Amino acid sequence: MRYLLKGGDVVGRQVIKKDILIDHGVIEAIDNDIEDDDATIIDCEGYTIAPGFIDMHVHLREPGYEHKETIKTGTQAAARGGFTTICPMPNTNPVMDSFEKLHAFMKKVETDAVVNVLPFAAITKELKENQELVDMKALKKMVAGFSNDGLGLQKASLMYHAMQRANEIEALISAHCEDESLLFGGYVHRGIKSQQNEWESMTALPESIQVARDVLISEETDARYHVCHISTKESIRIVRDAKKRGLKVTSEVTPHHILLVNHDVENENFKMNPPLRNVDDKYALIQALLDGTIDCIATDHAPHAESEKKRGMKEAPFGVVGLETAFPLIYTNLVRTNMATLTQAIQWFSINPAKILNVDLGYIVKNRQADLTILDLNRKQRINKNVFYSKGKNTPFDGWEAYGFPVMTFVRGKVVYHDETFNRY
């Protein structure tokens, strides 16, 4: 199929009005006033064309938890959110910890997924600390990297051996940082709201102590180390120092940690791990995103069944969904408020995650795979969880108004999402 995208504002390191010709999944030309009688013409005047977004941290739940999400529904939600590549975490049932399990998963991806799927494998067998490391060498070409997401590695020696092995094969370690000995049963961040509601709470220490430990291990082993869903000012301070010293350390932040704080917690749809932090943490995260300490936005898309989320604050599972709302929320609250530029947002959503993952994506370039999203930056829309493609409706942003929703998403030159309001062809 040939498509000619006419007159859109094309975003890379700058924004330039161009035509884009797509043929057989590849960008054939980027120029002014392209003519092609054989192509389906899409009028993009007044719309923005961005490189497809890349989410380094999602949960598709399949296999094992299909009542929460599936490969099909999760990737459809990704396409609706403008994401063309996603990296699901391995805490499924069974755990993604062997060639056979990953192979079976990717066979299902081939039939059910509408976007590119690059999974993480577990660091240890069954995500357990008393088990051996997975065969990283055998799995490296199949995966984005290795992570025990959902669980912090409690033994420093285990993380040391994992990073040592990862460095030998030039693989990425992506870490959920949480020292369980410092949780004290907490499931929200400590503050006035937790005291008022008598919710068991935690401080920033469980995260920041493991970030500090892991950065030192990364320095010792020279490993590539990525901090998942960073959330505290102390963690930021440690990562900023690591980058100044030239370590191979990167990090991600979620929209919910950028936009919400612990005082905003109203119900179980505000419960996630790490929890929403203090106001000073929020602004430290924003500053770190703006100055490059934090490299990218990741959603930590974590769908749950409504019945599970209604178990009460203590018993409800951690996690919120985010694939369908991430870009509009960041665009509306950081770009439209002039805290950031559109090109910065594209660095966070496309360019930087591609660099961290070492994949040939993230830019709109001639002869490259046509993974694109067309954005409507001018129309205001209310977030409505009831129309999500995801099975998960557990969002704290239901009812928020935002700009910048995708209206069309291409993966390898194929239209995988089309908003009914976009009728330009």
Image (spheres, rainbow, N blue to C red):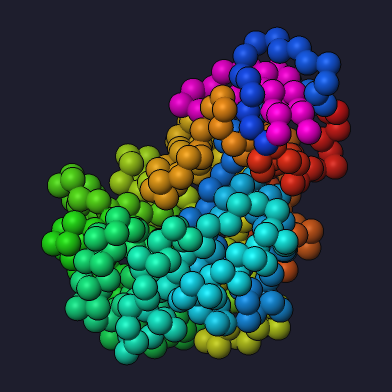
Whole-percent x, y for residue 81 in the image: 66, 49
Residue drawn at (66%, 41%) of the image: 412
Magenta stretch containing residue 23, yes or no? yes
Image coords of residue 108 (percent x, y): 67, 67
Of residues 18 and 188, which is closer to you in this image? 18
Q: Position of residue 253 (x, y in %)?
A: 43, 55
Q: Give the magenta range.
A: 1-24
Q: Is residue 275 above or below residue 34?
A: below
Visible residue check, residue 403: no
Side of 275 relative to 113 (left or right): left
The residue positioned farthest toward the top in the image shown = 33
Membership of 22 in magenta stretch: yes
* Residue drawn at the location 18% of the way across and 65% of the way down: 217
Most foreground residue, 233 or 218: 218
133 up-or-down from 254: above or below: below
In which image quadrant can residue 18 be found? top right
Q: Quadrant of the C terminus?
A: top right
Judged left or right of residue 168, residue 45 is right
How many labels sit on residues? 0
Q: Is residue 130 above or below residue 388?
A: below
Which secondary structure is most common in the magenta stretch? strand
